[in-house]
Image (cartoon, helix red, strand yellow):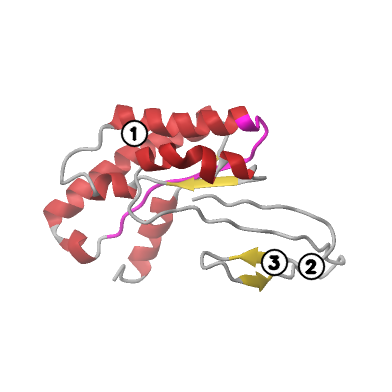
């Protein structure tokens, strides 16, 4: 997932959603006049892609866009497309590091947000064996993401923890 925020003073705030439709954003603050910015969000996520797929298109889909902020959520497809096998963790981390290294090389000061991959116990994952495999693999990837966030001075969003808490309050179905 790539999110690019471009801040330009003046004009009406806009965002571009995944379908390419522009919609208005208007920041408000009770105590100060709002400064108007133009913000564009670009989602470069492709359903079913794994970290190796992201690596192969990184230059075109991320680096060439010169983002002001970058967020990445990747990993669950590495589990789902693995045919029940374990994710090759060394290779997964190497590919992810390639993405982060390329991003830092292009812009050393680029703010980066890394989101943990996550799964919910719903659908086919209600099966205990499937759940244990998927959650176990995702937890391994989450540990790598946490370490990468530290290594690359990135913001780390513990997405799985958020969804686990939400699933305790309401059904993940």
Which of 126/93 is in front? 93
Q: Are marks 2 and 1 in contact (CB under 8 Å)?
A: no
Q: Mark 1 points at which residue?
A: 92
The residue located at (34%, 33%) in the rendering is: 92
Instruction: Report if residue 73 is visible in the image.
Output: yes
- Residue 142 or residue 102, whichever sits in front: 102
Q: Residues within 10 Å of mark 3 (few under 14, many from 20)?
A: some
Read off the residue under disc 2: 29
**Residue 53 drawn at (x, y percent):** 37, 42
Give the mark toward the camera: 2 or 1.
1
Counting the numbered discs, the total is 3
Position of 29 with respect to 143 (left or right) is right
Q: Which mark is residue 14?
A: 3
User: Which of the marked residues, 2 or 1, is nearer the chain's N terminus?
Assistant: 2
Number of residues whose C-alpha sits closer than 10 Å to that of mark 1, classed few (under 14), some (14–19) or many (20 or more) = some
Picture layout, residue 87 above or below residue 20: above
How far across and how far down the image is residue 124, in percent? 18, 62
Q: Give the range drawn in magenta.
A: 106-120
Label 2: few (<14), some (14–19) or many (≥20) C-alpha neighbours in 10 Å: few
In the image, which is nearer the foreground, mark 2 or mark 3?
Answer: 3
Residue 155 lies in quadrant: top right
Q: Main secondary structure of the magenta part?
A: loop
What is the spatial separation of the Cα atoms under label 2 and label 1, in whole angstroms?
43 Å
Q: Residue at the spot x=43%, y=56% of the render?
A: 162
Residue at x-position 78% and y-position 60%: 37
Residue 106, how many percent across, how many down?
Answer: 62, 31
Q: In which quarter of the image is the C terminus?
A: bottom left
Vertical order, 47 against 12 (above or below):
above
Report the disc number at residue 149: none
Compute the Cα span from label 3 to label 1: 35 Å
Q: Which residue is drawn at 66% across and 58% down?
A: 40
- Residue 35 occupies quadrant: bottom right
């Amino acid at each position: 997932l790539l999110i690019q925020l471009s801040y330009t003073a003046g004009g009406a705030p806009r965002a571009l959603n995944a379908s390419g439709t522009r919609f208005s954003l208007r920041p408000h603050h009770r105590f100060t006049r709002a400064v108007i910015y133009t913000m564009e969000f670009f989602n470069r996520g492709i359903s079913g892609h794994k970290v190796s797929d992201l690596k192969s298109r990184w230059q075109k889909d991320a680096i060439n866009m010169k983002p002001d902020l970058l967020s990445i959520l990747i990993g669950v497809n590495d589990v789902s497309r693995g045919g029940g096998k374990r994710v090759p963790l060394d290779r997964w981390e190497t590919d992810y590091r390639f993405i982060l290294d390329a991003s830092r090389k292009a812009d050393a000061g680029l703010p980066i947000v890394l989101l943990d991959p996550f799964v919910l116990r719903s659908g086919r994952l209600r099966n205990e064996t499937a759940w244990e495999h998927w959650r176990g693999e995702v937890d391994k990837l989450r540990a790598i993401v946490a370490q990468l966030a530290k290594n690359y001075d990135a913001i780390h969003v513990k997405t799985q923890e958020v969804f686990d808490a939400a699933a305790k309050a309401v059904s993940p179905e």
